[in-house]
Image (cartoon, rainbow, N blue to C red):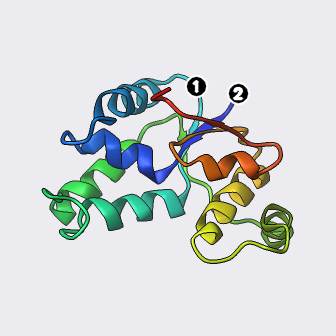
Amino acid sequence: MSVTVDTNILVYADNVADSAHGPASELVHSLAAGPAVFYLFWPTLLGYLRIVTHPAILPRPLAPSTAMHNVEQLIGLPHVRVPGEMAGFWTHYLDAAAGHTRGNDVPDAHIAALMRQHEVRVIYTRDRDFRRFDGIEARDPMS
């Protein structure tokens, strides 16, 4: 079974001030240890960089070089896959978006479409909105 994580899990894993830090950090370390294939999608990784380096979001943001190093460490692992959109992506996106996705739901539909295109069924996230996408199992590692 292939899995991925949402941006919020990566952020919690690095934010020791958050109550979700422990479970998120354990999950990311477990997935990083392998050997199971672990998918990371570019929208997730870039969202992580945006949030953990933003001083208006985190009380102690990471230096950009530190955040980029964290990403490099993950994507450099032999069992980690970082695929992007392939031919036919738009059809997957339209299916995930179901004709009514807008605003803040667009990035979730983007990730859901990537998951479908790459046959990734499970996403670890605290975002309940992922539950609305058929064929995607959203798991909250804090529950």
Asked whether the beta carbons under mark 2 and mark 1 sit within 8 Å of each other, the answer is yes
Quick one: quadrant of the N terminus? top right
- Of the residues tagged 2 and 1, which is closer to the observer? 2
Q: Is residue 75 visible?
A: no
Q: Residue at x 13, y 56 (%)?
A: 60
What residue lies at 86% left-to-right and 64% top-to-bottom? 95
Q: Which residue is mark 1?
A: 36
The residue pinned by badge 2 equals 1
Q: Quadrant of residue 64?
A: bottom left
User: What's the amino acid at mark 1?
Assistant: Ala
Tell whether 136 sits left or right of 67. Answer: right
Quarter of the figure with residue 3: top right
Residue drawn at (24%, 45%) of the image: 15
The one of 1 and 109 positioned closer to us in this rendering: 109
Going by the image, does 63 lie left or right of 100? left
Mark sitting earlier along the chain (2/1): 2
Left/right of residue 137 with respect to residue 45 in the rendered view: right
Residue furthest out toward the bottom: 103
Element on which disc 1 rests: loop
